Image: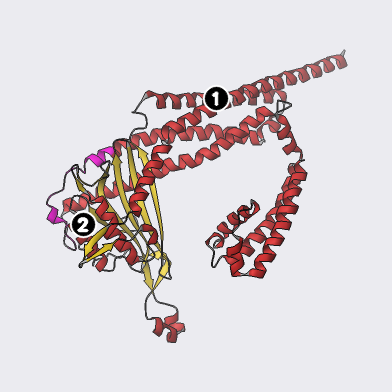
């Protein structure tokens, strides 16, 4: 009777394991359905939080203002201001700032000063920031004095910022977060703002000693219910040229206060995440009873599940936090309505009253907070891509239960090791061609000028997007050989080998 009892217990254990696995399978199907619902709700939540079309409209408007050229009378001649895209030197930046950007923001109209296009109210004015490099002795001064006598100028540390007080700017020159700053305040009229700018630039504030100069401004659009932050940056290269870039960020005035739909959508997403977490715990317990915990835990699907739960909770936390922070931001903007004391107390190059200094300190914090919140909101947009990949991986676990839908997943699982070794060979050959093109053409063509650009351009070449004639004009023979070998090795051999492995 002993061996029969043992056999019976073994059969019962197998049956229990089979039932546990079957129960786990049912939970996997349920989890896949919940994931589909979660994905739909997540997309709806992002659509409500990110007014993509309105953001695009605001960005286009500010970029148009940035590129606007104004014409004025100067010394009996009609002078046209510089466009943003044509700026190549710090002098060009000065002309653009003085004759184009500042006059546009200081527009006087029926709604008062600083109402751009009758829709965008300027907040505070324009903040100028400079990252100044620390001056050092040129190496050639000691080792090559004959060359230094020709150069006869200072050198600067590329990785060290100088925080010495710029006393020539004014008695109350300020620094903020490792940067020298200066305010053109919207409470003063255009002529005074331009006097500030002229005095500032005449002291050499924007010089070759700068590593970067930034021009920042903020707006409020009540029609679209958004706060807008604009930054134009001018990166000063050591040869003296300036590289321009600009960015526009938006913040919604209301995150949840504008209606119940957004709030209920986010609460529904939180509920779905809770259901996914419960199903994962129940599946884990089923596999514990079946004795297959190791096979259950150490899979890419479990990582995807953890990513979906933690990532979704992170998204919701960010939106709740931004909602709280915007309330504080609105209070700071409201405190800036009235002019602090006399306008004359903030004069170019003179001593500034404490009221103006306090106002600009509040503005510094306001701009810094707007930058932090808008960039955080932007990170949620970038994170949505990676979050959607985790959702897809969770769905793949459910696809495997279907003979038809699971075919693709099983195919990848079978050939995963062959693909791994193929990718090693592919990357070695591909990166070799990309870096070769970087050294051949990077000193002239911007698309090959950095290693990251080179890899990106090489991927585009695989798709047939290649400016062959520009490359050919630089090195005809090398370009021809590079193109032929790249086409044979990458396009004809390796890409087709990849298809064979999958098939």
Q: Classify residue 57 as left or right of residue 94.
A: right
Which of the pair 103/213 is nearer the observer?
Answer: 103
Visible in this render: residue 325?
yes
Asked if 304 appears above or below 483 in the picture, the reply is above
Which residue is situated farthest in the bottom direction here? 146
- Secondary structure of residue under mark 2: helix
In the image, farthest residue toward the front: 77
Give residue 441's position: percent from left, percent from top. Answer: 58, 66
- Quadrant of res 331: top left
Q: In this view, does 143 lie to the left or right of 120?
A: right
Q: Residue 193 bears which disc, if any? A: 2
The residue shown at (39%, 32%) is 320
**Mark drawn on residue 331:** none
User: In this view of the protein, which residue sits in the foreground, 433 or 174?
Assistant: 433
Please give the name of the residue rendered at 64% of the width and 64% of the height, measured from the top-left corner. 436
Residue 387 on image: x %, y %: 54, 37
The residue shown at (55%, 25%) is 37
Residue 37 shows which numbered tag?
Answer: 1
**Badge 1: residue crowd in 10 Å (few <14, some 14–19, many ≥20):** some
Q: Residue at horizontal 45%, vertical 32%? A: 47
Residue 110 image point, x, y percent: 18, 42
| Region of the chain picked out in magenta, as a range | 330-349
Question: As drawn, is 463 to the left or to the right of 344?
Answer: right
Q: Residues within 10 Å of mark 2 (few under 14, many from 20)?
A: many
Residue in the foreground of this view, choosing between 129 and 306: 129
Q: x, y percentage for residue 474?
A: 59, 69
Q: Which of marks 1 and 2 is nearer the N terminus?
A: 1
Distance between the alpha carbons at the discs numbered 1 and 2: 55 Å
């Amino acid at each position: 009777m002993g061996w029969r009892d043992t056999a019976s217990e073994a059969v019962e254990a197998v049956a229990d394991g089979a039932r546990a696995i079957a129960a786990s399978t049912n939970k996997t199907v349920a989890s896949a359905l919940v994931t589909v619902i979660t994905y739909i709700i997540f997309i709806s939540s992002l659509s409500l939080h990110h007014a993509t079309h309105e953001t695009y409209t605001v960005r286009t408007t500010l970029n148009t203002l940035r590129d606007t050229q104004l014409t004025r009378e100067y010394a009996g001649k009609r002078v046209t201001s510089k466009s943003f895209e044509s700026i190549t030197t710090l002098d060009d930046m000065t002309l653009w700032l003085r004759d184009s950007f500042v006059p546009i923001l200081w527009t006087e109209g029926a709604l008062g000063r600083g109402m751009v296009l009758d829709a965008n109210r300027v907040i505070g004015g324009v903040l100028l920031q400079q990252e100044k490099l620390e001056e050092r002795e040129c190496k050639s001064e000691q080792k090559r004095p004959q060359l230094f006598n020709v150069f006869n100028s200072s050198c600067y540390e590329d990785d060290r910022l100088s925080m010495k007080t710029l006393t020539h700017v004014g008695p109350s020159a300020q620094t903020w977060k490792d940067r020298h700053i200066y305010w053109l305040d919207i409470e003063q009229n255009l002529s005074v703002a331009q006097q500030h700018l002229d005095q500032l630039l005449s002291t050499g504030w924007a010089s070759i000693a700068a590593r970067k100069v930034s021009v920042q401004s903020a707006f409020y659009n009540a029609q679209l219910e958004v706060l807008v932050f604009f930054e134009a940056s001018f990166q000063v290269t050591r040869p003296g040229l300036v590289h321009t870039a600009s960015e526009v960020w938006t913040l919604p005035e209301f995150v949840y206060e504008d209606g119940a739909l957004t709030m209920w959508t986010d609460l529904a997403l939180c509920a779905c995440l809770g259901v996914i977490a419960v199903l994962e715990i129940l599946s884990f317990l089923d596999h514990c009873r079946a004795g297959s915990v190791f096979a259950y835990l150490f899979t890419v699907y479990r990582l995807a599940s953890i990513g979906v739960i933690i990532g979704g909770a992170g998204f919701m936390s960010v939106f709740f936090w931004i909602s709280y922070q915007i309330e504080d931001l609105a209070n700071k903007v409201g405190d800036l309505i009235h002019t602090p004391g006399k306008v004359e107390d903030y004069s170019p190059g003179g001593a500034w009253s404490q009221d103006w200094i306090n106002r600009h300190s509040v503005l510094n914090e306001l701009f810094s907070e707007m930058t932090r919140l808008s960039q955080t909101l932007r990170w949620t947009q970038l994170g949505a891509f990676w979050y959607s990949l985790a959702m897809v991986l969770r769905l793949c676990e459910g696809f495997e239960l279907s003979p038809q839908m699971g075919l693709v997943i099983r195919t990848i699982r079978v050939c995963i090791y062959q693909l791994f070794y193929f990718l090693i060979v592919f990357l070695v050959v591909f990166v070799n061609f990309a870096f070769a093109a970087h050294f051949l053409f990077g000193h002239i063509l911007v698309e090959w000028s950095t290693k990251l650009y080179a890899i990106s351009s090489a991927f585009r070449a695989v798709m047939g997007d290649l400016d062959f004639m520009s490359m050919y004009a630089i090195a005809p023979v090398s370009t021809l050989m590079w193109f032929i070998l790249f086409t044979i090795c990458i396009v004809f051999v390796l890409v087709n080998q990849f298809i064979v492995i999958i098939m």
